[in-house]
Amino acid sequence: MTTTEQPVIVLVHGAFAESASWNGVIRRLHGHGLAAVAVANPLRGVEGDATYLRDVIAGIGRPVVLVGHSYGGMVITRAAAGNPAVRALVYVAAFAPEPGESALLLSAKFEGSSLGGALNAYPVASGGNEFRIDEAKFHHQFCADLDADEAALMAATQRPVTERALTDGLTGEPGWRTTPSWSVFGERDLNIPAAALRFMAERASARGTSEIAGASHAVAVSRPVAVATTILDAAEHVRG
């Protein structure tokens, strides 16, 4: 479905990141006359996080291009299902699950993720554990292609994720099955192996796939031009 109305770009961060991780991308989207909203993803569980995202989309009241990073891909996949406001999906180093698949399952589907050894876990009052990346390991694990000062800031502002969120399987049909999707990711992603990201993009019949040489998991921060270019491609498709 195409529209002459300019879509709003809705950006959903993943685990161990936060809304400001989209700042460089947003600057470039604004430069092309596109409005953008960076959502504060609760990171509590796929179904609840997707429900919150649907509320944000409803409040915008316009067609949207839904963009997810990492675990945010789980959330946009669920939120887009049966939602006519969502006209395109962009997966930025993100999970694009089938029903029943979780972030944890998909990250282990191919060799190469070293995330498990970088995590600190602690119990939360609501039950189960919460995870954050050890600050001493954050730079290498999450954003090796950024300078040390920026990596230290990202480590300090990271948003922890619950164990439940990472182990929740997708319920219902995936949004990418009926909504056109695009994929962009880094060749040197240590959280989600590039092989897994390639596999999911192919399975979702992505309209465009861009693998960025040398880029880390934090590809939206380190390579905002490449990420914005993919989003602009999706927005152009929506406008027809």
Image (spheres, grey):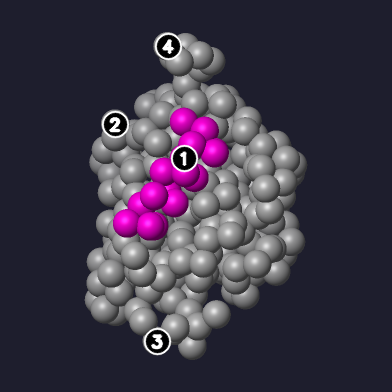
Which callout, 2 or 1, points at the residue further toward the start of the chain?
1
Q: Is residue 58 magenta?
A: yes
Q: Check disc 4 and report its element: helix, strand or loop.
A: loop
The residue at the point 58 percent across, 53 percent down is 77
Q: Residues within 10 Å of mark 4 (few under 14, many from 20)?
A: few
Q: Is residue 128 above or below residue 186?
A: above
What label does residue 4 carry, if any?
Answer: 3
The residue at the point 44 percent across, 76 percent down is 235
Circles 1 and 3: CB distance less than 8 Å?
no
Circles 4 and 3: CB distance less than 8 Å?
no
Residue 157: name its quadrant: top left
Foreground: 89 or 29? 89
Judging by the rendered image, the residue that carries numbered circle 2 is 156
Amino acid at pointer 1: Asp
Q: Check disc 2 and report its element: helix, strand or loop.
A: helix
Amino acid at pointer 3: Thr
Which callout, 2 or 4, points at the residue further toward the start of the chain?
4
Q: Nearer the viewer, mark 2 or mark 1?
A: 1
Label 2 to label 1: alpha-carbon separation: 23 Å
The total number of labels drawn is 4
Give how far across and how far down residue 22 sits, in percent.
33, 55
How would you classify the magenta stretch by its main secondary structure?
helix
Give how far across and how far down residue 164 sits, in percent.
56, 26
Q: Which residues are magenta?
A: 44-59
